[in-house]
Amino acid sequence: MESTSTDQLPERSRAVARALADAGVPGRVRLLADSARTAAAAAEALGCEVGAIANSLVFTADDGPVLLLTSGAHRVDLPAAAARLGVTGLRRATPDEVRAATGQAIGGVAPVGHPAPVRTGVDVALAAYPEVWAAGGHPHTVFPTTFDELVRITGGTPISVVG
């Protein structure tokens, strides 16, 4: 897979590419031939383990949206994640709520490039992989990163999202 010129990217992915560049991230947003809406599809397209895919899941909490960047290898334990984030509960955001919070559609939500900062939790399981892949703002775009870089660029809280 080759790097993609920024002008070849969808509009939302260009915003992500700008945010990454502004944060000093060396990885570039890449365009995939097929959709990477699921961790399994992304892992297959990238030739990596499903656990190295950083799923971007948007929830609502007492005080607004929460983005959880989770390893594609497991499911989120909502009560455990809520407790670790210090909120009374998490509810899966609707597609409209996801777009309002991130400016992006489900299946392509990036960790950055949102209209305003979104409270973020970063799954500590991602630290097991030297390289992880995150969505680039569109179901056909991704970018390489690391656990530490995800925490830095999102201002996220490292948490375990499993029970």
Image (tube, helix red, strand yellow):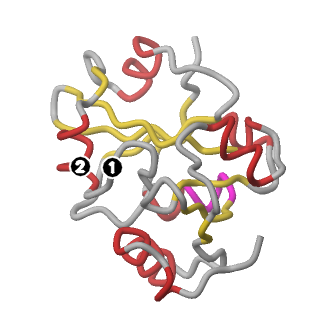
The quarter of the picture where the N terminus appears is: bottom right
The count of marks equals 2
Q: Residues within 10 Å of mark 1 (few under 14, many from 20)?
A: some
Residue at figure coordinates x 77%, y 44% from the top left:
44
Asked whether the residues under the numbered discs 1 and 2 touch, taking CB atoms below 8 Å apart as contact, a structural biologist would say yes
Amino acid type, mark 2: Arg
Q: Residue at x 45, y 22 (%)?
A: 81
Query: For this view, does 75 lie left or right of residue 51?
Result: left
Question: Which amino acid, by three-letter code, is at mark 1?
Answer: Ala
Q: Helix or strand or loop: what does disc 2 sit on?
A: helix
Q: Quadrant of residue 92?
A: top left
The quadrant holding residue 54 is top right
The quadrant of the rendering that contains the C terminus is top right
Residues 63 and 100: in front is: 100
Q: Residues within 10 Å of mark 2 (few under 14, many from 20)?
A: some
Q: Name the spot of residue 13 as percent of width and height, x first.
A: 43, 70
Q: Tell me where the magenta segment starts and ends, as one range.
A: 146-150
Of pointers 1 and 2, the one earlier in the residue sequence: 2
Report which residue position mark 1 lands on: 105
Kindly report the secondary structure that dominates the magenta region of the rendered protein.
helix
In the depicted view, which residue is nearer to us: 106 or 143? 106
Q: CA distance from mark 1 to mark 2?
A: 6 Å
The picture quadrant where one finds residue 144 is bottom right
Q: Disc 2 marks which residue?
A: 99
Write the residue at 44% across / 24% down: 84
- Asked if residue 65 lies in the magenta stretch, the reply is no
Q: Is residue 13 above or below residue 52?
A: below
